[in-house]
Amino acid sequence: MASSMRSLFSDRSRYVDSFRRFLDNSTEHQCMQEFMDKKLPGIIARIGDTKSEIKILSVGGGAGEIDLQILSKVQAQYPGVHINNEVVEPSAEQIAKYKELVAKTSNLKNIKFSWHKETSSEYQNRMMEKKELQEWDFIHMIQMLYYVKDIPATLKFFHSLLATNAKILIILVSGTSGWEKLWKKYGSRLPRDDLCQYVTSSDLTQMLDKLGIKYECYDLLSTMDISDCFIDGSENGDLLWDFLTETCNFNSTAPPDLKAEIMKDLQEPEFSVKKEGKVLFNNSLSFIVVEA
């Protein structure tokens, strides 16, 4: 590994830029929206039965775009019922964006929002110290389990907080996606960071099986347009390279042989499809619904 290569997470603003480019160039949010429209209503159909208040915990809520979609589905299912929505999110920047979004969104009257600037494990420790664990009707963990050190312990803890009829929704990359193949093949040659681990739905379902926790898993196809990665001097391509490899300035710091190998692989059918002159990386997502 070239010593000049460093983890993308070592440069916060570069990471945020590359993440935004990923969202702009992928169907990630559209894929989630499709799930929220088609599947979520059935999943949350009973979470608020006979309850005067519905308690929702968003773990790693980010800037809130997906959270508000979830809340609108809960409102539609339980019109007029009070919703207590608590958000655990370590990034002050993301919390500020979330608050801005809430401020300019109508129809949130019956929802009380509160934000905690902390990681899921900090939240877990804080709750354990209190010794009075609050129960939740719906917990969601969207694209955040990569940043958790001990995933089985985290799953076990949040599962223990579920009220009657409650559910946890976990979204992360599918074991059938290009990410799984990219990480397996090249993970050891890219700069590692304690902050992030390579985990897909196939790892997660094995952990849930071991813990004896009941779940259902749905896969939805999502793609990321990586065509610009093959255009020299493209700023968009550079940022997408960073996101794909979790490496800061990958394009200018990676050993040429490594870059050439990944470049060739990314165009292979097990990683991407070629369509209308574009190279579309397989960004398929798994939606795992855990039962109380």
Image (spheres, rainbow, N blue to C red):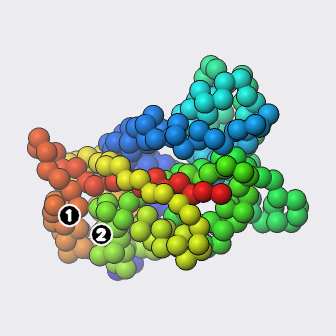
Residue situated in front as seen by the camera: 94 or 40:
40
Task: Give left or right: position of 6 versus 66.
Answer: left
- Residue 270, labelled with which disc? 1
Task: Give left or right: position of 195 versus 280.
Answer: right
Residue 48 seen anywhere in this rendered image of the structure: yes
Residue situated in front as seen by the camera: 104 or 175:
175
Image quadrant of residue 72?
top right
The residue located at (61%, 33%) in the rendering is 74
Whether residues under marks 1 and 2 lie with C-beta atoms below 8 angstroms apart, the answer is: yes
Q: Count the marks.
A: 2
Judge the density around disc 2: few (<14), some (14-19), many (≥20) Cα neighbours within 10 Å: some
Task: Give left or right: position of 263 versus 238.
Answer: left
Residue situated in front as seen by the camera: 221 or 137:
137
User: Would you name the residue on which mark 2 appears?
Assistant: 181
The residue located at (53%, 54%) in the rendering is 289
Task: Give left or right: position of 227 versus 114.
Answer: left
The percent coordinates of residue 28 (x first, y second) are: 39, 45
Mark 2: which amino acid? Lys
**Label 1 SS:** loop
The residue located at (44%, 49%) in the rendering is 19
Image quadrant of residue 144?
bottom right
Above or below: residue 66 compared with residue 260: above
